[in-house]
Image (cartoon, grey):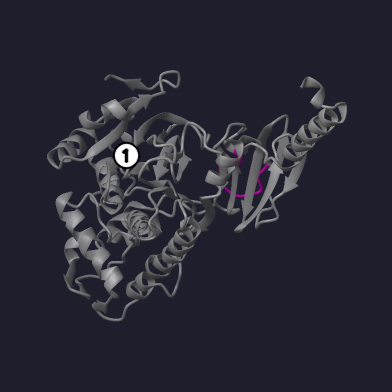
Amino acid sequence: MINKIKKGDIIVFIGVILLILLISVITFPKSDGDVVEITVNEKTTTYSLFENVTIETNGEYNNVVVIKDKKVRVSDARCPDKVCKNTGEISKKGQSIICVPEKMIIKIKGGGKIDGIAN
Amino acid sequence: MLLLNSCQSKNEYTNNFFTMDTPMSITAYGKNAKEGVTKSISYINRLDGLFSKTLNQSEISLANNRDGSAYVFSETVSALIAKSLEYSKATDGAFDITLGTLTNLWDTKSETPKIPSEKDISDALKLTGYKNLIQDKTHVLFKNALKLDMGGVVKGYACDGVYEILSDYGIKSAIVNLGGNIYVIGEKPDKTPWNVGIKDPRNDDQNAIIGYISVKDTSIVTSGDYQRYFIKDGIRYHHIIDPKTGSPSESDLISATIISPSSTMADAFSTAVFIMGREKGEKFLKENNIDYILITKSKEVIVSENLKSSFTFEGKEKGYIYDK
């Protein structure tokens, strides 16, 4: 009975499993907390929290956003109130940096412990 | 399992946008989430077009530049004026939509804010007062040259409207954040309550909180001296004008949060209670059976009895005091 499973069957079986794993690695969405969304003037661009990148926001004041070492901050604020820069670094799911003059919302995607802040 | 999760999250729709000079965000869950949120945004834009003080062609601007002493408003604007007058009476004038001349004078939004002279303030004070507005349905009679500023109530009104729209679209789970005025609809999709943080009024970090409340089907609105302000010679000049003095309120509160299913009321009363101060404010809220979280200048956090079990305090390391 055991001999009915041939060597070829096992190879095909392992092959199928490997293929499924490969497909799921490629297509499986990144987890929420790894994605940084930057919205300026209604236009949203997404970045990975794992990349090291410097972004000019191209709004009215063209602020500079830096993603580095899994943290996001506004490194240079040319807007009048600098509230965005003063917020400092964010790194957790659901955290955000908002700049009203620049009409900019930076958000680390996903639900953290806090769903919103009354303000 | 993994596939199932990703299917569920497809029913989530979020939009971040700027209207009424403030950041807004709506996240809704359910089949009609996208339609509901899109409809809500056009509704908010319509309200901005009616109530804005900065848009020249808004109904409020047109009424403020009226010829003569009467103005006929649209039904939407009249309804909110009527409600606002009720709130003014209830709070003995601590909430007042007739302070337009004063809020223009104290332009805390300006890049180079100035402290107005005492004479300018006393002159502007003469052009205020909710009792100088006489309303008969959509017809309003202005007894002096006052200007309306409905900024203290319009975001709350918009929150209530968005709640209605999303409910009409059959949405049972959503969080609406209109410039810090929050409305939570139902529970989160995982059937737990929403956690809404209360902003730390003495920390520039926008994500800093003194604690949070776990709630469902209600709105949470905060008025504080930290939202728009400038500091000159060590004095903090913020945007909440006391209708009695014509200057930024000098009560013993630095933050007043109201929790109520009526966001319009929560918006108006958070301003009023901030101005009334702790003693008068707490008495007023208790009499009207309204939930609240107040923060005093000495960093004491006061939570209404009813709300204590859903409040989690996280402000100890930041110097706040909370005595259960």
Q: Is B313 located above or below residue B228 in the figure?
A: above
Q: Is residue A50 visible?
A: yes
Q: Principal SS element in the magenta part?
A: loop
SS class of the residue under badge 1?
Answer: strand
- Quick one: B246 or A17, which is closer to the camera? A17
Q: Is A104 one of the magenta-colored residues?
A: no
Which of the 4 image quarters holds residue A21?
A: top right
Assess disc 1: are there few (<14), some (14-19) or many (≥20) residues with their C-alpha within 10 Å of its C-alpha: many
Which of the 4 image quarters holds residue B164?
A: bottom left
Q: Indicate left or right for B254 with A13 as reference.
A: left
Q: Indicate left or right for A64 with B187 as reference.
A: right
- The chain letter for the residue carrying disc 1 is B
Which of the 4 image quarters holds residue A68?
A: top right
Q: Quadrant of the C terminus of chain A?
A: top left
- Residue numbers of the magenta segment: A76-85
- Quick one: B283 or A81, which is closer to the camera? B283
In percent of width and height, residue B158 lies at: 36, 58
Q: Residue at x 37, y 36 (%)?
A: B193
| Outermost residue, bottom side | B67
The residue to which callout 1 is attached is B257
- Quick one: A78 or B116, which is closer to the camera? A78
Q: Is A80 one of the magenta-colored residues?
A: yes
